[in-house]
Amino acid sequence: MTSTFLGMPVYAPKGVGGLRGDEPFPDAARTALANAQLRRNLGHATRTIRGKRAAVVGEVPDWEQLRLAGEAVKAATMARLPELLVQLEERVTARGATVHWARDAAEANAIVLDLVRAAGADEVVKVKSMATQEMGLNEALAEGGVTAWETDLAELIVQLGDDRPSHILVPAIHRNRTEIRDIFRRTMPDAGDLSDEPRELAMAARAYLREKFLTARVAVSGANFAVAETGTLAVVESEGNGRMCLTLPQTLITVMGIEKVVPTWTDLEVFLQLLPRSSTGERMNPYTSLWTGVTPGDGPQDVHLVLVDNGRTAVLSDPAGRAALHCIRCSACLNVCPVYERTGGHAYGSVYPGPIGAVLSPQLTGVADNASLPYASSLCGACFDACPVRIDIPTMLVHLRARHVEQRATRAVPSPEAVAMAAMSWVMARPARFRGAERLMRLGRLLGRRDDRITTLPPPLSAWTAARDLPRPPGQTFREWWRTRPSSSSAAPASPPEATGD
């Protein structure tokens, strides 16, 4: 067993991986909203997944008890994460595998590249893995002369289309089958006559990947869970490609975020009930693969586990934000989010889109590097209702917004928003100032007299009315009504009169 000091909590490094976007969410979302086909694809897909999930969740009489159990197990795991990781390393090592510790994405990528080179390989097959996307592993391997082949169908579509994932569970959710057919025709040999029938597309991908499975000497996988008491790793998937990667190559490298550990087999039972229903809308996963170290003569004989921090200890250090590490990557929050359904995953800039990405990515990178993501929400609460481990995402979003505001308050030059809030605070601090402001607001009735609402204001306030209207101020303030209300001795309670015209 190795001894590794991970140091004090640090954020995921800049320039490595896929946690930071090129532009703020509002700008990227505006581009996505202009794509009508994208919105149709997303709307159809998320409605279908929501319907399937609702049906299978409704069959479980103790669903809420399962959610509470999942939440409790995750909270207990985070409370004793260091000792569980040490226990996991001991059990994995005892079964003939090797454990590597990586402080960040750069270290993890270097470890995997060195292992691939040591195996004498120049290509690897990959099981779908959010951790390797977060690290930018494919790009790091390519720079080192190693080709990584995605074997999950949706990931393959994204890779062949030179695209980026748009969903945690269904990376190609933003593509329809006609677009997928065109991608296959461009990139696959002998696919010129391919139709857009789903079965035909799936069979074409199967034939394309079969050669990769049979020739690859190294496979890279993620892990949905790792059981500390036995050193067992688990991958759940729907297509069987994971099973092929986990059994055929000689070398298997598993890359896992440190938060994926669970204490016992009994704890794993809870998540194997919660995950499939919340993700694919199935009662159980078609393929659940479990392996513990090396089994002589069966499967990979050179097995490695890379445990990745990459900002997770920084998340763990925040009591109000650490519940983001409870996420089991089911994507249920994405499928119910009205913001995600209209903008898609690319607008978030991170490999973790949707509500969970809006709270996880800023914490992994530091809020300043993803400052717009906590605001990418209407705070409707649908994500909390759908989350199988009861992550209170709306409360966490408010917490991260507060952190962002506090950080901006330390700047030498205040932002326009800070100036506006300071001015409002000054006005509302004295009754006389507030009364004066009420009288000035009445001038707004002139701007809204045509439609009974204010649709345009001069700069810089035009930035607000460009996307929303303001109600027309009433003709009478509350203070004025209070002074003229009927006497309290009247039989019937007084009601504020309707706003009068000019």
Image (cartoon, rainbow, N blue to C red):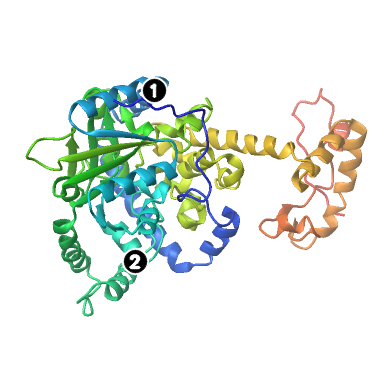
Label drawn at residue 115: none
Q: Foreground residue, 3 or 61?
A: 3
Q: Position of residue 157 (x, y in %)?
A: 31, 63
Q: Is residue 120 left or right of residue 501?
A: left
Residue shown at 12%/42% (left/top)? 299
Few, some or many C-alpha atoms within 10 Å of disc 2 (few <14, some 14-19, many ≥20)? some
Q: Is residue 331 visible?
A: no
Q: Nearer the viewer, residue 39 or 154?
A: 154
Q: Amino acid type of disc 1?
A: Pro
Image height of 6 relative to 140, above or below: above
Q: Is residue 241 left or right of residue 420?
A: left
Left or right of 288: which side holds 9? right
Q: Secondary structure at mark 2?
A: loop
Residue at image location 47% in from the left, 68% down from the top: 36
- In the rendered image, the quadrant that contains the N terminus is top left
Quadrant position of the C terminus in the picture = bottom right
Q: Amino acid at mark 2?
A: Asn
| Numbered tag placed on residue 82 in the rendering | 1
Residue pictured at 20% horizontal, 45% vertical? 251
Query: Where is 7 relative to 195, above or below?
Result: above
The residue singled out by tag 2 in the image is 176
Q: Position of residue 80 (x, y in %)?
A: 39, 20
The part of the image, by quadrant, that contains residue 62 is top left
Q: Residue at x 63, y 35 (%)?
A: 403
